[in-house]
Image (cartoon, coloured by chain):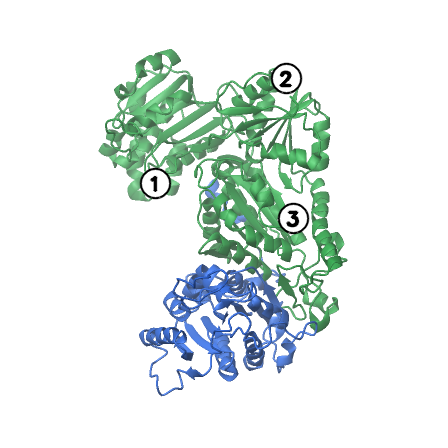
Chain colours: A blue, B green
Amino acid sequence: MSAFSAIGEDREIDREEFTPTLEPQATWCPGCGDFGVLKALKQAMPEIGRNPDEVLLVTGIGCSGKLNSYFECYGYHSIHGRSLPIARAAKLANPDLEVIAAGGDGDGYGIGGNHFMHTARENHDMTYIVFDNEIFGLTKGQTSPTSPKGHKSKTQPHGSAKDPIRPLSLALTSGASYVARTAAVNPNQAKEILVEAMQHDGFAHVDFLTQCPTWNKDARQYVPYIDVNDSDDYDFDPTNKEEAAAMATEAEKGLYEGEVLTGRFYVDSDRPSYSEEKQAIGEMPEEALAERYFDDDYEWERTHDMFLDRHK
Amino acid sequence: MTDHELMWRIAGGSGDGIASTSQNFAKALMRAGLHVFTHRHYPSRIRGGHTYTEVRADSDPVRSRGDGFNFLLALGDSFARNPQEGAYYGDEEVKPLSENLDELNDGGVIVYDTGLLDADDIPNFEQRVEENDWHVYPINLREIARDHGREVMRNTAGVGATAALLGIDLQYFEELMAESMPEDILEPNKEILHYTHDMVKEEFDLTHDLRVPQGSHDEEQVLLSGSDTIAYGALDEGCRFIAGYPMTPWTEVFTIMSQALPEVGGISEQVEDEIAAAALALGASHAGVKAMSGSSGGGFALMSEPLGLAEMSETPVVLVEAMRAGPSTGLPTKPEQADLEHVLYTSQGDSNRVVLAPGTVAEAYEQSRLAFQLAYGYNIPAILLYDQKIGGELMNVPASHFDREPNPDLGAVTTEAELAEAPHGPGGKFHRYRYDAEDGVSPRSIPGQKDGHFLVTGNEHNQAGHIDEDPTNRVTQVERRASKLDAIREFLDGQSTQTYMGPDEADYGLITFGSQQGTVAEAVDRLNAAGHSVKGIGVSDMMPYPVEEMTEFLESVDEALVVEMNSSGQFRGLTQKELGRFGDKLSSLLKYNGEPFEPAEIVAGFEASIEGQDVPDQQTTYVPAAGD
């Protein structure tokens, strides 16, 4: 019997279960795109049938990190850039949990860029939502890794001399098996993509365009947007990596030219998740490791019996 | 220690099999009934360079490296750089012989491989041999190995020669070889072993007196390093998750764990950097698995921020820190104890962690287990601080020391039944951080447990984990977290984590922490035998500091000398800070040349200190007490 009875509980889920009573109203600025992520995520939960006690949401630091305060579940508001290594270890420890990591573009593509690359490479079965607003919001408007070249801010008074990070291409080349972009202004698509991302067995990266009305007033509001999977103007196969790469490159380029291309860019349902890979080579148990500590019948191994002979 | 002890040094180049040969040699002597202790010296170099391992063996227990050594087996350095005129590194080909002569004791024995070393290349060799009464046995080990097997087997020839010269029964070596070698390698090795042994007996008149000591064990022994025992302690506490990134010397623990964990259904993760490594350990622990990570100084620096998160979020985790000489890349393969302050204080905010520094290979097992018990019992990070010395040295320990029950207890966690009754905040958040928790320890729930959800955050938070900047809440939570250290101190006072040496009453004290304990213990015995009145203490509890025990110790002596491997006297500083007095009683004996103390250096340093003289050895430094 599982020590974690919330996992797999068979009942109807109400999205309002994820609204905290203590602080039901988020303190993001009026018009902030982050509200769109919160709403889409709450709407997605009944569809995947997960309750607050079986969801682990790990965030970093930034406006995005406040998601944990406004979304009721096992929350882990960690440190800047480090949500992914915490989240993926929790998933290895207990693969039965629904594990979601979230952070901003500075958090995920800047300070945590190394973890992003490696978590995608390993294809952990989890969802990573990046609140991409092309700016540092919480620290009041500095240029971020996705700010366009030439972007002026208090810390880049002459405009950024750097080309922005291309997050979709980065995810793709690193090995993510599900790569999508959606926007806060497109709530239906956002919810659908989050549902798919959480149901996907592998690392699902969602670059979530979240307009910042306070610190990035020059930025577009990500309208009008085009869904590349629905539009007749784009013909590509998201299960084909080469075609996905070309489409991602076009979307990344387009964003800085006023064209908001969203949708699923890459979906690889065949690639085994990291847990499956590790189990296949005998480096991860089949049953959730976390269960073992609550199993009174488990015979714990002793080094005296297992490893001491080689030292005699 | 007896007068008949053997201190055998095997020297060659990195990559010449010095480590494996010396390990088998030590194990053979242990099986022959002796107590053994090894000291490893190797350069931060890929191939070649001056490398040696000493094996000290005696019929009595051996706790330290010795003073110098009395038997040199000088193999060639097969990766020596070709010497050019005026080369900075000199003639590396002769170094296995030349570099070791300064520390070879009077009357010592030298075996060198004439197939690779020419004594004529060493300045004044004959003269030095005569002056020091060395007994030299030149043997073409390389040729023997080549004729009867392969050239790389010359180590075996060297062991055969050693056995002949010291009177060691070959059976112990044969058995070990049979256990580790495949048939096609075993046969030529056995032939080389016997051939060299018999040849030496036939061709040389033995002019030296040194013979292998005779001894017997009254119970079965095992030969282990500190890295082994740290890993085994973790496994016996039910640790089933490790994340790490390679760095010398911590890599040894990581390697042992990575090979053992799949055998016990655990998980090892080699990840992108040490920030990730520590963060993974937190993530796994949060999800309900006993987890660890670790590194050496540079990598541990990267763990600072996750360490602080573990303190603030009260996520239990064990980190190990294998010190090597710093700052920065420092001396990558040499021991030092200069990361004490780093480990105590790194990360922003007030420290709220346990730091233990085991003094011996056997203690490392117990304190590795203790680190897990404290971390999980009190929901606090615990750090095991050790160094390259204790991590790599091998010594014999009774097998029965490890015959203990495993303890997979997750510590201060809730069950679902308890959660159903536990207080919750608005929105159903479990009160994970209760103000009124006993000993400050508020049990945690594990994700997936029904009615257990709460928020972990690095921000200051209220009882449910919700971010809260209210001053009263702040003070309450800071004090509750701090009170866990008081409770841990009280618990540790009932344990025996400090090690006492010498008589109960004495005029002088010798104080040390961590890996120098065995060497200080030997020095204490020698000083008392020489008529001094000295007692010693090896301290393991760095945080929370053993205030009562140390106060009692210092009140009982007139003066005390603090022995540590760093240049700024960090442990003496900690002692004065924690006790707030005794500054006029405490002087320091420091060593920071990349080598651990020898017992004689501590004896000499102590004698110089009480007579107010300079320490005779340039390699150690004496710092007088405040006001002196």
- The amino acid sitting under disc 1 is Ile
Q: Are marks 1 and 3 on the same chain?
A: yes
Dot 2 or dot 3: first in sequence order is: 3
- For label 3, the residue is B350
Q: Is residue B620 left or right of residue B187?
A: right
- For label 2, the residue is B532
> Mark 2 near mark 3, Cβ–Cβ under 8 Å?
no
Image quarter where the C terminus of chain B lies is top right
Q: Are marks 2 and 3 on the same chain?
A: yes
Label 2, label 3: how far apart the Cα atoms are? 42 Å
Q: Between label 2 and label 3, give the one nearer the viewer.
A: 3
Instruction: Check the image and name the residue furthest to the bottom.
Output: A232
User: Callout 2 environment at 10 Å: few (<14), some (14 to 19), or many (20+)?
Assistant: some
Q: Between label 2 and label 1, give the one nearer the viewer.
A: 1
Q: Does residue B115 appear in the picture of this structure?
A: yes
Can you tell which mark lies on residue B46?
1
Q: Is residue A264 above or below residue A302?
A: below
**Residue B345 location, x and y as percent?**
60, 44
Q: Secondary structure at mark 1?
A: loop
Q: Is residue B625 left or right of residue B186?
A: right
- The amino acid sitting under disc 2 is His
Q: Between label 1 and label 3, give the one nearer the viewer.
A: 3
Q: Is residue A103 above or below residue A311?
A: below
